[in-house]
């Protein structure tokens, strides 16, 4: 279980998170929506300790992330897969080496690494792309490699940062299907940060809207679709103010 | 005015603090040999082999110019075999390490700052962290170790090249015999001339690569940030290199 407990964060005096409180239950996929620049990705990065909160904390299975020492933090990160907005693939490594990098850190044998790399690439429909370099891939393929890199670790939690941003609608739908398939195959708990409502409805169990540094509403997908909250309504319908 | 001085002072103190923190983080990563061991070899090839042509090119022309300028300066009042002395001493003590260092500050320091800066702004450094790698072990230690080890090797070859071209220029252009050139080369030679230059080069290698890493990993923004970091790395490295040069002369040559 991942709990955002009154999380506060400011950059250069500008408040981004002003007390985010949210519980993500085991096995569910929570989608965090919100306007660009409202701190969705900032909240997500606190889960893996990439950012330190100014106040409050993120608690993962009872462990307050900001209080963990280096060993504790790396132990936590071994349980979490993170899919970055622009995939964050290592330019100098092939697709297979990108996927294998995290596995090598875990001290697996080369045979097991090769098997897991094949399995992860097959799950994202990229079998045969092992030797290609990131520069040779399209945006959608890069995102799929990013997902393969995360799921190859067989994590308990998967965090997606804007997984469909910048993709055409068809490729975005492919990524959505992939996230659903990944969840069905691996049974992981997921947090998806997005402002793509079609994606949110497809992959989410519950949706939380981040607005002005706090969670404005959190509810199951069907309930959010029928919401009477004017702010949430405006956002999900994409109406200009 | 006072506010400006205050801000500058605070910024300078913060920069020193960040530098100290960075170096202590790097020291903490040293036991993680399993991560940096293999990567250091890759970096040694990149820093060493790939940088060699530019260093040798500079050294070759420096050797020729030194021989000609020495001859021009002596103008018949000083025996010409002192050309060998001047070429050898100058290449070993100063021009070999400093010219190669300045060239490599541009080539190695800038490329490291640009590479790490790009990794930073494209979240590759964050991705490393989420894969449970310490960026210090994975990115910084291999580069700094490679620079510290390979700079003396590059400079040693540059010194040899400079002396060689100085000798050839003396033979062809100054009518100096090999025996006279070597006599001048041996005159006043001390073993300290050799180790001083190489030790200084190691300190330059450490500084240039460390500055490249610190500036690169501190990059903010997109392409503009990477450009600024690259420029900063070259300027800071060049300035620090000249300060270090004076420092070692003061400490070791007095």
Image: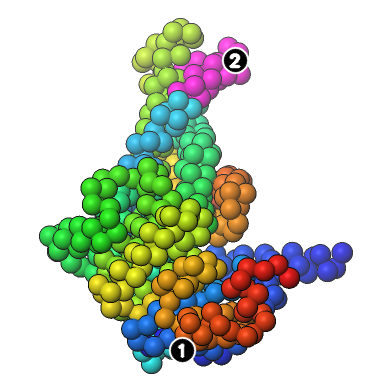
Question: Disc 1 to disc 2, how far (Cα)?
Answer: 82 Å
Number of numbered discs overlaid on the protein picture: 2
Of residue A90 and residue A17, the one placed in the foreground of this image is A17
Please say if A125 is above or below A65: above
Pointer 1 and pointer 2 on the same chain: no
Q: Which residues are magenta?
A: B59-82
Label 2, residues with CA under 10 Å away: few <14, some 14-19, many ≥20? few
Looking at the image, residue B79 sits to the left or right of residue B144; the answer is right
Q: Nearer the viewer, mark 1 or mark 2?
A: 1
A95 over B80 or under it: above or below: below
Q: Residue at x 57, y 19 (%)?
A: B69
Question: Where, quadrant-wise, is the N terminus of chain A in this rendering?
Answer: bottom left
Is residue A134 one of those drawn in magenta?
no
Under circle 1, the secondary element is strand
**Residue B172 at x, y percent in the picture:** 44, 8
Res A52 seen here? no
User: On screen, A9 above or below B116?
Assistant: below
Q: Which residue is disc 2 drawn over? A: B72
Residue identified by numbered label 1 = A23
Secondary structure beneath disc 2?
helix
Which is more toward the observer, B8 or B159? B8
Q: Residue at x 47, y 81 (%)?
A: A221
Q: Position of residue A114 (x, y in %)?
A: 17, 58
């Amino acid at each position: 279980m991942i709990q955002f407990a009154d999380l506060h964060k400011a950059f250069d005096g500008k408040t981004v998170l002003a007390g985010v409180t949210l519980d993500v239950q085991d096995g569910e996929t929570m989608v965090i929506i919100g306007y660009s620049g409202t701190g969705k990705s900032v909240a997500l990065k606190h889960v893996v300790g990439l950012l330190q909160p100014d106040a409050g904390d993120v608690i993962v299975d009872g462990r307050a992330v900001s209080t963990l020492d280096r060993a504790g933090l790396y132990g936590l990160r071994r349980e979490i897969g993170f899919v970055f907005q622009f995939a964050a693939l290592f330019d100098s490594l092939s697709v297979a080496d990108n996927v294998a990098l995290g596995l090598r850190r875990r001290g697996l044998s080369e045979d097991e690494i090769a098997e897991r790399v094949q399995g992860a690439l097959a799950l994202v429909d990229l079998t045969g792309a092992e030797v290609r370099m990131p520069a040779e891939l399209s945006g959608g393929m890069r995102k799929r490699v990013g997902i393969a890199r995360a799921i190859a670790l067989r994590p308990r939690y998967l965090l997606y940062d804007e997984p469909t941003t910048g993709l055409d609608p068809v490729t975005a739908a492919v990524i959505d299907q992939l996230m659903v398939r990944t969840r069905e195959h691996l049974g992981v708990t997921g947090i998806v940060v997005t402002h793509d409502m079609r994606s949110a409805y497809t992959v989410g169990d519950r949706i939380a809207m981040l607005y002005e540094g706090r969670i404005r509403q959190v509810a199951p997908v069907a309930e959010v679709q029928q919401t009477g909250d004017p702010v949430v309504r405006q956002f999900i319908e994409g109406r200009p103010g | 005015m006072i506010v400006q001085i205050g801000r500058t002072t605070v910024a300078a103190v913060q920069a020193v603090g960040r530098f100290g923190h960075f170096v202590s983080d790097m020291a903490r990563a040293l036991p993680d040999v399993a991560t940096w061991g293999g990567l250091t070899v890759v970096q040694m090839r990149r820093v060493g082999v790939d940088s060699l042509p530019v260093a040798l090119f500079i050294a070759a022309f420096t050797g020729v110019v030194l021989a000609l300028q020495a001859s021009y300066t002596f103008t018949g009042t000083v025996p010409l075999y002192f050309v060998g002395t001047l070429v050898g001493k100058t290449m070993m003590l100063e021009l070999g390490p400093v010219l190669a260092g300045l060239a490599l500050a541009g080539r190695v320091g800038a490329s490291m700052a640009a590479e790490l800066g790009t990794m930073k702004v494209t979240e590759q450094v964050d991705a490393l962290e989420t894969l449970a790698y310490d960026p210090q072990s994975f990115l910084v230690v291999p580069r700094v170790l490679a620079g510290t080890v390979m700079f003396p090797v590059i400079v040693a070859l540059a010194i040899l090249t400079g002396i060689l071209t100085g000798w050839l220029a003396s033979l062809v252009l100054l009518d100096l015999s090999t025996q006279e050139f070597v006599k001048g080369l041996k005159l006043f030679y001390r073993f300290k001339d050799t180790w001083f230059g190489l030790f200084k080069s190691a300190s330059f290698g450490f500084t240039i690569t460390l500055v490249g890493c610190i500036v690169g990993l501190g990059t903010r923004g997109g392409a503009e940030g990477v450009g600024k970091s690259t420029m900063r790395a070259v300027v800071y490295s060049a300035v620090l290199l000249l300060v270090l040069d004076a420092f070692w002369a003061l400490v070791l040559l007095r």
